[in-house]
Image (cartoon, helix red, strand yellow):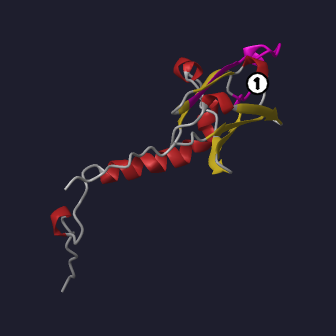
Amino acid sequence: MVRRFLAIRPNDGAQPMEAFSSVDRMMRDMLRAFGDFSSEVRSSEAEDTIAMPRGDFYRKDGKFVAELEIPGIDPEKVDLKVYEDRMTLSAEKSDERAVDEGNFFRTERHYGTISRSVQFPAEVDPDSATASFKNGVLTVEVAEKVQVERMKKVDISA
């Protein structure tokens, strides 16, 4: 007697089958396999993208603090604006090297426009904003706006 193993049909499984799950798994596998080569692939679209600097954002002593990594950028060329509800940063990072394109075998650094907008969790006082730059990190501190509690004593008439 020959044993036969029955294949489980997609609808017979205990978990519902997601549409395209096998395609998603295949794409993840391909991206993982080609991940080491992705930085070598360059296209005109990749060069036109706007980079977003990474940062840490936290609250300390009644102030909102933002620490943004912007290495290789002159702090005088950074456009930093603080509004009551958000902060925006933009700058241009130019490539000033005198090396021909054909002589590169790999380039991973970004040149061009960087931009970031961060929404504050509460209103701030833009006039209190200060910024400092050290070792490629821009630190911005803004005082949280103190909301004056307004009230009115209401007499109750009988």
Q: Residue furthest left?
A: 11
Is 88 in the magenta?
yes
Answer whether residue 151 is visible to the viewer in this image. yes
Q: Position of residue 75 (x, y in %)?
A: 77, 23
Residue 116 showing in the rendered view: no
Q: Position of residue 128 (x, y in %)?
A: 67, 32
Image point 74% across, 27% down: which residue? Answer: 105
76 lies left or right of 39:
right
**As rendered, which of 102 and 44 lies closer to the eye?**
44
Up/down of 69 relative to 47, above or below: below
Q: Closest to the observer: 129 or 66?
A: 129
Work out whether residue 153 or residue 60 is closer to the camera in this orientation and state it.
153
Q: Locate the C terminus by quadrant.
A: bottom left
Amino acid of disc 1: Ile
The magenta stretch spans residue 143: no
Name the residue nearer the viewer: 53 or 127: 127
Badge 1 element? loop
Q: Which of the image's four quarters has the N terminus?
A: bottom left
Give the residue at x 41% y 46%: 151
Q: Quadrant of residue 63?
A: top right
Q: Position of residue 10 (x, y in %)?
A: 20, 62
Q: Residues within 10 Å of mark 1 (few under 14, many from 20)?
A: some
Q: Where residue 52 sits in the image (x, y, percent)?
A: 59, 31
Q: Residue at x 60, y 33 (%)?
A: 125
**First to last magenta residue range:** 87-109
Which residue corresponds to the image point at 33% horizontal and 53% vertical from the top-left?
A: 22
Residue 155 in the figure: left or right of residue 151: left
Residue under circle 1? 73
Which residue is situated farthest in the bottom direction here?
1
Please state if 20 lies on the left or on the right of 26 as rendered.
left
